[in-house]
Image (cartoon, rainbow, N blue to C red):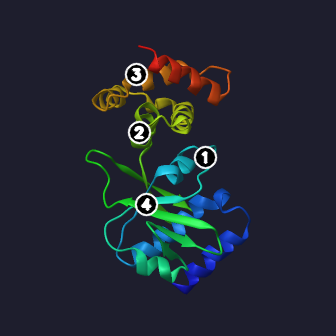
């Protein structure tokens, strides 16, 4: 564990931890696996990975069963409410759930020689569409648009079916229609938001 702790400190020492968040997540995941916990990166960290850094997250969210506290303490984290905080790095880790929702899937990626399970792009997109459509989070709309642009094969009939089940097909269609717009992502998302809110 000491070796992973030293590696995490080295990653943090490179500068803004947000730029190295996915690498930090892979180190943390390895420590958790050594403790018998198989984490899945979700949320903003998954968005950062699936957008190749175009979206930058401020924290790491994992879905994992079990008690992560001993493994995280071994890396230098301290519990602060529902988060684990690494005081040297300014790194925050949260475990919002023990499991993915039924039907969600993962992919395994290699991050500097370490395996990292991550929620799949279609499932992340549906999560961001829900945050945009029902949570009013424009940043989720921006992230959804990034995912659609960066993963052109993503918009499938299966995705449309699932989006309809989750009542976000209108948001998917509106954002997809704007994929080639030269306007800023923020402007596109505001325009789509206005259309979605117009009865």
Q: Is 112 in front, or is 88?
A: 88
Question: What is the CA distance from the residue labelled 2 to the residue labelled 4?
Answer: 17 Å
Badge 3 marks a residue whose secondary structure is helix
Mark 3 or 1, nearer chain start: 1
Label 2 neighbour load within 10 Å: few <14, some 14-19, many 20+: many
Badge 4 marks a residue whose secondary structure is strand
Answer whether labels 2 and 1 touch (C-beta < 8 Å): no
Residue behind mark 1: 52
Label 3 neighbour load within 10 Å: few <14, some 14-19, many 20+: some
Residue behind mark 2: 122
Residue 35 rendering spot, x and y as whole percentages: 38, 78
Residue at 32% over, 46% down: 104
Q: Is residue 174 left or right of residue 146?
A: left
Residue 89 rendering spot, x and y as whole percentages: 64, 70
Answer whether labels 3 and 4 touch (C-beta < 8 Å): no
Residue behind mark 3: 170
Q: Is residue 32 visible?
A: yes
Q: Nearer the viewer, mark 3 or mark 1?
A: 3
Q: Is residue 42 left or right of residue 178?
A: left
Badge 1 marks a residue whose secondary structure is loop
Mark 3 or 4, nearer chain start: 4
Mark 3 or 2, nearer chain start: 2
Residue behind mark 4: 62
Badge 2 marks a residue whose secondary structure is helix
Residue at 36% over, 71% down: 37
Residue at 55% over, 50% down: 49
Mark 2 or 4, nearer chain start: 4
Question: What is the CA distance from the residue labelled 4 to the residue labelled 1?
Answer: 19 Å
Q: Nearer the viewer, mark 4 or mark 1?
A: 4
């Amino acid at each position: 564990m000491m070796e992973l702790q030293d590696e995490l400190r080295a990653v943090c020492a490179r500068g803004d931890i947000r730029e190295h968040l996915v690498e930090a997540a892979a180190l943390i995941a390895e420590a958790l696996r050594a403790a018998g916990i198989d984490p899945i990166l979700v949320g903003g960290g998954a968005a950062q990975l699936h957008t190749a850094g175009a979206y930058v997250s401020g924290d790491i969210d994992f879905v994992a069963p079990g008690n992560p506290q001993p493994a995280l303490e071994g890396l230098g984290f301290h519990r602060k409410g529902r988060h684990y905080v690494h005081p040297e790095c300014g790194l925050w880790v949260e475990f919002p759930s023990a499991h993915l929702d039924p039907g969600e899937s993962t992919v395994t990626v290699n991050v500097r020689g370490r395996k990292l399970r991550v929620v799949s792009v279609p499932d992340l997109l549906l999560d961001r569409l829900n945050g945009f459509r029902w949570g009013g989070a424009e940043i989720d709309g921006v992230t959804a648009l990034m995912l659609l642009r960066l993963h052109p094969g993503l918009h499938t009939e299966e995705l449309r079916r699932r989006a309809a089940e989750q009542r976000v097909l209108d948001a998917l269609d509106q954002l997809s229609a704007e994929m080639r717009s030269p306007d800023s992502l923020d402007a596109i998302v505001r325009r789509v938001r206005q259309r979605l809110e117009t009865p």
